[in-house]
Amino acid sequence: MPHPPSPELPLTFADKIYHFLYFTVGSIFLTGFIYQLNHRQASWKWIAGSVLGLLAICGAIDEYHQSFVSGRSGNDLYDWLANMVGAVAGFSIFYALRRRIKWNS
């Protein structure tokens, strides 16, 4: 979609906040999925590497794709960095919640 509808924030860097939030939520769900998929046996380092690697690739592909959509700017390093900061935040949130909440095996 060339100009997706979104609530406008009165900030010049609002799109970075959207990228951050989108990838934070995605990272929380992806971390939980990989955690459950591996039957809770994988190390946290392996899970973190998998989540951050997959989301780094996804963010790069998304930025590349945006360069072909009229009205959108693509290949923006700062958008990709906002994606990655969101991915780290999402992983950290899941990890912290997992350590605080004892889930049944």
Image (cartoon, helix red, strand yellow):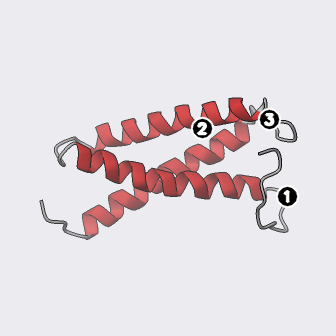
Identify the image quadrant of the N terminus.
top right
Give the residue number, with chain letter if any, for mark 1: 12
The amino acid type, in three-letter code, at marker 3 is: Val
Give the residue number, with chain letter if any, for mark 3: 69
- Residue count near mark 3 (Cα–Cα under 10 Å), binned few <14, some 14–19, many ≥20: few
Identify the image quadrant of the C terminus.
bottom left
Work out whether mark 2 precedes mark 1 in sequence or the reverse, and give the earlier one. 1
Q: Position of residue 72 (x, y in %)?
A: 82, 41
Work out whether mark 3 precedes mark 1 in sequence or the reverse, and give the earlier one. 1
Kindly report the distance in space between the C-alpha atoms of the residues bearing marks 2 and 3. Answer: 16 Å
Q: Position of residue 45 (x, y in %)?
A: 31, 40
In the visual, does 79 lie left or right of 72?
A: left
Secondary structure category for the residue under label 2:
helix
At 55% from the left and 51% from the top, the residue drawn is 23
Label 3 near label 2: C-beta < 8 Å? no
Kindly report the distance in space between the C-alpha atoms of the residues bearing marks 2 and 1. Answer: 21 Å
Give the residue number, with chain letter if any, for mark 2: 59
At 27% from the left and 48% from the top, the residue drawn is 35
- Residue count near mark 2 (Cα–Cα under 10 Å), binned few <14, some 14–19, many ≥20: many
Choose mark 3 or mark 1, whichever is in front. Answer: 3
At 30% from the left and 37% from the top, the residue drawn is 46
